[in-house]
Image: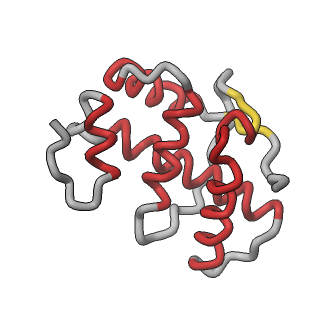
């Protein structure tokens, strides 16, 4: 499936937040952390606020690098979320909503005081929040 989003460039704030997450979770790859963040934002019941997001960092990746083997599934999730939120599913809107979800999710993960290691991300993904140890 071809993505309407070719390249993703993060804000400097998001880069700084990802650096914090890299230190705490020991996940070194930007794209993996970004996938967690994107999914974290999609899990919210409300749409992200339509705020301008600068592209002022040196962190950039293609959609395929971001999504990896899950890129088609992540694109379908974005399209479904746009549909659910009442947004048109066109190239520009998908790109905008993706950036908003990605940056909101990065902020949520970086600001969560309960995320101290990779297992804490996994706990977030579990519905019942049971201890994985």
In this view of the protein, which residue sits in the foreground, 73 or 124? Answer: 73
Residue 83 screen position, x and y as percent: 65, 77
Q: How is the image coloured?
A: secondary structure
State which quadrant residue 64 falls in.
top right
With respect to residue 79, does 29 lie above or below?
Answer: above
At 52% from the left and 49% from the top, the residue drawn is 38
Left or right placement of residue 55 versus residue 4 in this view = left
With respect to residue 84, does 109 lie above or below?
Answer: above
Left or right placement of residue 77 versus residue 75 in this view = left
Q: Is any part of residue 4 visible from this angle?
A: no
Image quadrant holding the N terminus, namely bottom right
With respect to residue 16, does 101 lie above or below?
Answer: below
Image quadrant holding the C terminus, namely top left
Residue 121 screen position, x and y as percent: 33, 40
In this view of the protein, which residue sits in the foreground, 130 or 65? Answer: 130
Residue 81 screen position, x and y as percent: 58, 70
Q: Is any part of residue 56 visible from this angle?
A: yes
Tally the numbered discs: 0
State which quadrant residue 26 falls in.
top left
Residue 118 screen position, x and y as percent: 32, 30
At 66% from the left and 38% from the top, the residue drawn is 68
At 49% from the left and 34% from the top, the residue drawn is 33
Left or right placement of residue 26 versus residue 5 in this view = left
With respect to residue 116, does 74 lie above or below?
Answer: below
């Amino acid at each position: 499936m071809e993505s309407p989003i070719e390249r993703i460039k993060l804000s400097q704030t998001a880069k700084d937040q990802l650096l914090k997450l890299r230190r705490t979770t020991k996940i070194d790859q930007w794209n993996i952390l970004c996938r967690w963040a994107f999914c974290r934002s999609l899990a919210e019941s409300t749409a992200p606020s339509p705020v301008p997001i600068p592209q002022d960092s040196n962190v950039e990746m293609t959609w395929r690098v971001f999504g990896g083997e899950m890129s088609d599934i992540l694109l379908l999730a974005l399209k479904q979320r746009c549909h659910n939120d009442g947004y048109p599913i066109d190239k520009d809107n998908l790109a905008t909503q993706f950036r908003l979800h990605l940056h909101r999710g990065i902020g949520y993960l970086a600001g969560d005081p309960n995320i101290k290691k990779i297992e804490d991300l996994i706990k977030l993904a579990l519905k019942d929040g049971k201890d994985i140890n």
